[in-house]
Image: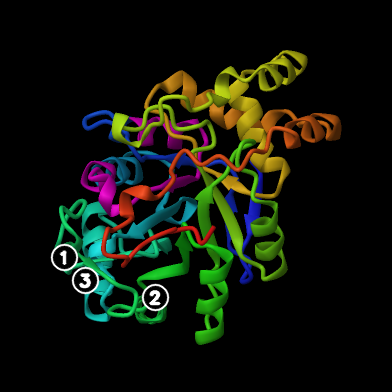
């Protein structure tokens, strides 16, 4: 297993199991199979709607195997409807209840976007959004810092934050984010973000490492490129006698990032973890670098509002 370290020495595996879009009645078995296979890192979120099933799986594993809670690193995320200071810790406690845990290893602010308190899912109108003037990100962040101080979480961070938003948060708080979870893959390599985070000792988790082809039709473009079918990726895979997916996962490990490929298929779960068993050569990485086209599969446009509250989520 390959790990990265937080500033206090805590470790996180570079390959974890993602649970976004994992189907009901399958995600629990996927989590159990992953842990039995050797995974030590599970990535969750309240909005995924499956934390209760994952909680049942975790409780079963901890009760009926040699795997203990302290052996596993579990991440979850604060949804946009709980950004007000008074809503953060109650939302976290709901996640802890669903996951049947006493603490999280990592808690992330899922998006730099705020909804009205109590709204579940996605807004139906502009009125369902709260602007960042109404609920500044620093207000949400300070409540997350308090959650860490209370021992409810060991580490705190953000997701989908730009360098601009990271800098703003760091300028306003004595506690810097310990993680930024962002979309990363050969079509979206974000070198500037990697350099910034490395400089400030912020770890990076790459989501959608395989191109997220199972997104809902509403999130897809008609002509979007498919990472797993890329000729260069497949040529490198043939060279190392591995799959295209394993090349894409190893790409992040080689760059010093964490990645969280999702699967509920036992053989794929095993294959994804075994991506750690080979190493891309520098020539491979140089070739993959040529694929960068700053293409986002998760473009954030579903959060843009016609009244201007939210536009250009990634500050690009």
Q: Residue at x 84, y 35 (%)?
A: 282
- Secondary structure beneath disc 1? helix
Q: Residue at x 27, y 72 (%)?
A: 88
CB contact under 8 Å: marks 3 and 2: no
Q: Position of residue 291 (x, y in %)?
A: 69, 32
User: Of the residues under marks 1 and 3, which one precedes in the sequence?
Assistant: 3
Where is mark 1, residue-wise?
A: 127
CB contact under 8 Å: marks 1 and 3: no
156 relative to 139, above or below: above
How far apart, in angstroms, are the residues tagged by discs 1 and 3?
23 Å
- Secondary structure beneath disc 3? helix
Q: Nearer the viewer, mark 1 or mark 2?
A: 1
Q: Nearer the viewer, mark 1 or mark 3?
A: 1
Give left or right: position of 285 versus 94: right
Name the quarter where the N terminus is drawn. Answer: top right
Q: Nearer the viewer, mark 3 or mark 2?
A: 2
* Residue 270, magenta (yes or no): no
Where is mark 2, residue-wise?
A: 137
CB contact under 8 Å: marks 1 and 2: no
Q: Residue at x 39, y 82 (%)?
A: 142
User: Of the residues under marks 1 and 2, which one precedes in the sequence?
Assistant: 1
How far apart, in angstroms, are the residues tagged by discs 3 and 2?
17 Å
Query: How busy is the neighbourhood of tag 2: few (under 14 within 10 Å), some, or many (20 plus)?
Result: many
- Can you tell which quarter of the image residue 189 is in? top right
User: Of the residues under marks 3 and 2, which one precedes in the sequence?
Assistant: 3
How far apart, in angstroms, are the residues tagged by discs 1 and 2?
19 Å
Q: Residue at x 65, y 63 (%)?
A: 197
Residue 159 makes an appearance in the image: yes
- What segment is highlighted magenta in the picture? 30-54
Residue 173 makes an appearance in the image: no
Where is mark 3, residue-wise?
A: 90
State the residue in front, 144 or 84. 84
């Amino acid at each position: 297993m390959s790990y990265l370290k937080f500033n206090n020495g805590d470790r996180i595996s570079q390959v974890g199991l993602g649970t976004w879009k994992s189907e009901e009645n399958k995600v629990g078995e996927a989590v159990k199979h992953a842990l039995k296979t050797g995974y030590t890192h599970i990535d969750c979120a309240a909005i995924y709607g499956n934390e209760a099933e994952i909680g049942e799986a975790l409780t079963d594993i901890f009760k009926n195997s040699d795997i203990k809670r302290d052996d596993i690193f579990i991440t979850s995320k604060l949804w946009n409807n709980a950004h007000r200071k008074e809503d953060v810790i109650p939302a976290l406690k709901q996640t802890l209840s669903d996951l049947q845990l006493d603490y999280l290893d990592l808690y992330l602010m899922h998006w730099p976007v705020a909804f009205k308190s109590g709204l579940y899912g996605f807004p139906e109108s502009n009125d369902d959004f709260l602007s960042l003037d109404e609920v500044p990100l620093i207000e949400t962040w300070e409540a997350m810092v308090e959650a860490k101080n209370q021992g409810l979480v060991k580490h705190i961070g953000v997701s989908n934050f730009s360098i601009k938003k990271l800098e703003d948060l760091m300028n306003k708080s004595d506690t810097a984010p310990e993680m930024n979870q962002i979309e990363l893959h050969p079509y979206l390599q974000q070198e500037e973000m990697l350099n910034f985070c490395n400089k400030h000792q912020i770890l990076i988790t790459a989501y959608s490492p395989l191109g997220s082809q199972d997104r809902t039709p509403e999130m897809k473009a008609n002509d979007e490129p498919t990472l797993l079918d890329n000729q260069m990726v497949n040529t490198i895979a043939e060279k190392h006698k591995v799959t295209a997916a394993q090349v894409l996962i190893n790409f992040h490990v080689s760059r010093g990032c964490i990645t969280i490929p999702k699967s509920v298929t036992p053989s794929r779960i095993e294959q994804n973890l075994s991506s750690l068993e080979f190493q891309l050569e520098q020539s491979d990485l140089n070739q993959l670098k040529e694929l960068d086209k700053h293409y986002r599969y998760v473009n954030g446009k579903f959060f843009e509002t016609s009244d201007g509250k939210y536009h250009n989520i990634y500050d690009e």
